[in-house]
Image: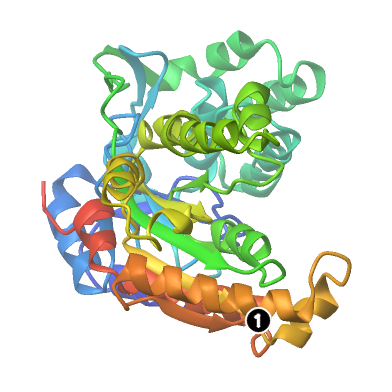
Amino acid sequence: MNSHLALLFGTLNSTNIKYFLLTDFEGDFESADVDLFVRADDKRVFEELLFSLGWYKRKEPARHLNHFFYYLPNSEVYLDVKYALSFAHGHNDCFTYAQQDGALAKATLNNKGVCRPTGLDAVLLYAAHLAYKERGKLEEKHRHYLSSYITRYKAECEPTMLPLLEEMESWLNRSFPLQLQELQQLVAPYFRHEKKEMVRSNSRFTKYGYGLNVLFLGTDGAGKTTLIKEVRQQLNLKSSLLYLGMGENGWTTPLFKRFYARRSQNKPLNRVLGLLRTLVILPSEFMLRILPVKMKSKYSVVLIDRFPGFVFSNGNPGRKLLYKTILPKPDLVFFLHADPEVLVSRKPVEITLEGSRANITKFKKVAEVISKGKYVSIDTSKLTISEARDCIISEIYKHSKVYDNLFTLKLD
């Protein structure tokens, strides 16, 4: 258990807040999310405690109305909290555990010092996750978990409950992951069927916009693609990827790609083609790339790979205005570079020493113009990939828009 979770659970255990784990009952915490149940009467006090320890509530409303998400900046874990032991079964139906108060009263500390449900409560609550598919697509790991909980907590169950556990084991061995209605029938006597809205009805434009736009600029060989991938994997926030380069890959249609690459020996015709490329084809292509990302990124960090710097490095005001209208405005700009000799060694076939020096100067100027001199410079020849990644993630969490657009400290 990491130090942040140890502090959280140690503090929780010193209060009167009633809670227990909803999965991972022994507290191994091998995944990024920690599933908790907290008594509804304790919600306000629980959130005040979280905020005092540096946690934030996710601003994006959860798809399931009975889930609430909490994040600790620059931490690899987050909390998925329920304030009722209800499991969605469709948009307007749920099944609520009938023995909630008893489960809280019987909860005990596991070996890590975290409250967990005991015996039949633990088995039934995890089985409900599977029966009502709140875990999404069922995988082999879910079979393993339920089987291990039945084995581990059988000794805590009343002897009269052993036939039920045997039937669950039989279903796991015979029917998993199919025939979910059989598992539903086994757990049904312990849950109340209720009619209430469980899944949020979102309009198409609910997530339209940008949370935080992070731009990566740099020469070939500086590590843009690798670092973006690393940041996206490690960043404990929702993220979207937007490619705004003009290379071989990433085009939305072959037609635009062919037209953009077209050149003519006829100089007047070539000038016309150049105007069409700059004022029609490329803006249209960028809009086709940008719109799908913008439709879903109001609560996300948008990682932008490359930028049409030539637009902002010349004095054509009309062209600048056109592209400023279309392109997302970067909130944070990273200029990735390395010693020219290192760049050549990374891509000896594609890069020359003279070319890499010229490109470093060119992209540095673009970074200065776009960020108004406030870019973050990262020399990837002096840092390992993990060091550069951690530096970038640290800068992201320092940005005010993370706390304005993605997190909130508002109590319900």
Q: Is residue 85 left or right of residue 343?
A: left
Q: Answer whether residue 405 is visible to the viewer in this image.
A: yes
User: Vertical placement of 23 versus 87: above or below?
Assistant: below
Residue 6: image location, x then y, percent: 43, 75
Q: Quadrant of residue 45?
A: bottom left
Q: Is residue 316 above or below residue 391?
A: above
**Along the viewing direction, whichever of 347 and 297 lies nearer the viewer:** 347
Q: Which residue is mark 1?
A: 357
Q: Residue at (81%, 24%) from the top-left corner?
A: 173
| Rendered image quadrant of residue 263 | top right
> In the drawing, does residue 408 fall left or right of residue 108?
left
Image point (28%, 13%), residue name: 194
Q: Extreme bottom residue here?
A: 382
Of residues 282 and 93, the one drawn nearer to the viewer in this rendering: 282
Residue 60 x, y percent position in the rendering: 28, 42
Q: Nearer the viewer, residue 42 or 267?
A: 267
Which residue: 63% across, 39% down?
250
Image quarter in which the N terminus is found: bottom right
Amino acid type at circle 1 is Arg
Can residue 2 be seen from the camera position used here? no
Q: At which x and y percent is residue 213?
A: 37, 55
Which image quadrant for residue 262? top right
